[in-house]
Image (cartoon, grey):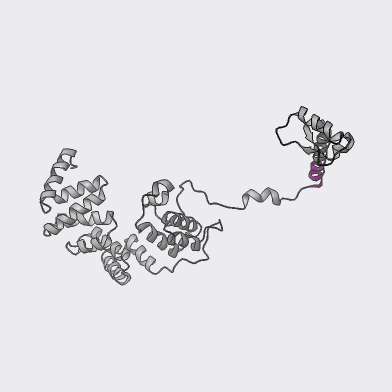
Amino acid sequence: MPLTDPELELLTELVADDPGADSFPRVGEELLRRGRAKEAYDVLRRGVGANPHLDAGWLAFVAAAEATQDYVAVLEALENVDADPSVNPDLARSRITALDRTGQATRVRSACNRFLEVHPGDAAVRHVLEMLDAPPPSVARTARDPFLTVKRAEEYVLHGRLDKAIRAYRRILHHHPRDRGLEKRLFELIDMPHDHDWLSDDLSEEILAADLTATGPAPDINMPAPSIGHPDEEMTQPHSIEEIERTLRELSRRREALMSEPASDYEYGEGDDVDDDEARTEMIPFRGTRTPAASAARRGTNKSGR
């Protein structure tokens, strides 16, 4: 049963004075339930250190360590509880995940085989074995957008922008759904610790929704596959003779309308002593702030040679 705020405050003060008190697992579980994973981790870490014989404390610490992605601590905690697949399959899966995240491929394979002996139909563990055999993602893999490639995604990783790398890999995986190498790399990036300071600015739905699976086509998250080909399609279409002639007639009509406008709206070129007919061939559209009266006065000065 969840703790009330006063109860949590009281028990928190108690375990602060006595970290190994029997109530520390309950405090940690409640903090974890409220989304305060780091606080739960600290309470439970102190608790199991002060009272290592309380199984409930180690079980709660496993959950807190997983929530904070401290997989070394997960393995440490699992050494103090019974994680045999025939007894507790959930803890056995947690052990496989922790071994995988800490890069212990040989122990992962052994743990998976041991688990499948007891639960041969477990698709999640069998999938882990498939991922172990997956080749690295090919550089040739790309989304429809030629700028979204495996190489570009890895460049984002080097620059610390895991959100952009995850987005790129999800788009590439959408077009290559059976590529286990892409899927494995995507899971690795999702499990990496992220700098949440810029996360709210970038609004990266891939990290905010890290529980989205990468198997098969990416779910609809309002991110249509980009393409650079569509905007220029009209420019590449051939035009008919009628369309070209119609365009030429329109240009000719506009030129005649321009030439027939009053000269007061234009400014002459640099030459002086020009009559009205010549001026019409040398007109430059007036771009300043001079009024038509000022333009007429200037033309009068030009005609007099001053």
Quadrant for the N terminus, please: top left
Residue at image location 25% in from the left, 47% down from the top: 36
Name, please, the residue furthest toward the front: 306
Q: Magenta-highlighted stretch: main secondary structure?
A: helix
| Residue 294 image offset from top left, x and y in percent | 76, 29
Residue nearer the viewer, 237 or 157: 157
Quadrant for the C terminus, please: top right
Residue nearer the viewer, 167 or 215: 167
On whether residue 227 falls in the magenta region, the answer is no
Left or right: where does residue 233 sit relative to residue 83?
right
Residue nearer the viewer, 286 or 13: 286
| Residue 92 image offset from top left, x and y in percent | 25, 62
| Residue 193 image offset from top left, x and y in percent | 34, 57
Residue at image location 16% in from the left, 63% down from the top: 80
First to last magenta residue range? 240-247
Residue at image location 79% in from the left, 42% down from the top: 247
Give above or below for 115 relative to 15. Answer: below
